[in-house]
Amino acid sequence: MNRILKDRRIHHIIVVILLFLLSGCKSWQRSDLKDGDLLFVTAKETGLSGAINNVTQKQKNTSFDHIGILKKEGNSFFVLHAAPKGGSQKQSLKDFIRDETEDKQRIVVYRLKAEFQNSIPSALEKAGSMLGKPYNFNYILDNNSYYCSDFIERAFREDHIFKLEPMTFIDPKTGKVNIFWEEFYKKKNLKVPEGELGCNPNGLAGSDKLERIKEL
């Protein structure tokens, strides 16, 4: 009996140590995050996510369909972003990570290079002023609603960190409008906004003003 109790105590101690180490790893992962870090979420291969990536991916190492900006308040981190569920919102980093990992998507941290860091305070202030706006499900620029990359571009617009570019919905494999987008806009009784100004996560990730830091 004494031996069984001793083994149980040892097992309990090992479990506690492992939990402590895992907790420490998570804390270390987040300890080097900074105000203004950009969190890019990897794209899926199908559905809306896959359709976005299909017509916007420019580099092999960038395959993203969502983006948010990190804000630190005291010892807590929050993500300011525009998402289909909840519109333009302020979400705890913990919940943001949970939502994306549950959806089997990864998060990659990008950071403005040193010479552009002074743009962050005003960008966070601007992002805060846009919270509460609905999500832009048409992906056509609108001052009353925002989609994810649009939200971030606007936040940094005053300092010209990112730029709007003509959008394309052409499938690079066929040279024709991607079928998903053709049907998407047909259901909305809208013309595919080919060539209209806009932005997307892959385009923002490709900016030479950013550097890739790590994957969370």
Image: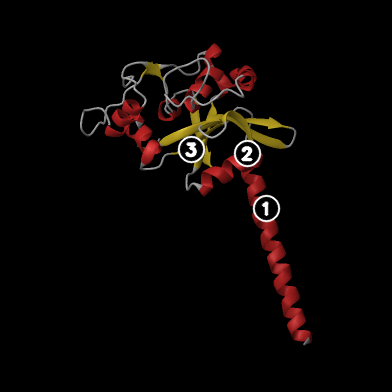
Q: Nearer the viewer, residue 123 or 22?
A: 123
Can residue 61 be seen in the rendering of this structure?
Answer: no
Please tell me whether mark 1 sits on a helix, a strand or a loop: helix
Dividing the image into 4 quarters, which one contains the N terminus?
Answer: bottom right
Q: Residues within 10 Å of mark 3 (few under 14, many from 20)?
A: many
Q: Quadrant of residue 189?
A: top left
* Labels 2 & 1 near each other (Cβ < 8 A): no
Q: Which residue is mark 2?
A: 93
Q: Nearer the viewer, residue 197 or 141?
A: 141
Residue occupying image coordinates x 62% and y 39%: 93
Distance between the Cα atoms at labels 2 and 1? 16 Å
Q: Amino acid at mark 2?
A: Leu
Task: Give the mark, 1 or 3, whose residue is nearer the N terminus.
Answer: 1
Can residue 1 be seen in the rendering of this structure?
Answer: yes
Q: Nearer the viewer, residue 209 or 204?
A: 204
Q: Which residue is mark 1?
A: 23
Q: Which residue is mark 3?
A: 41
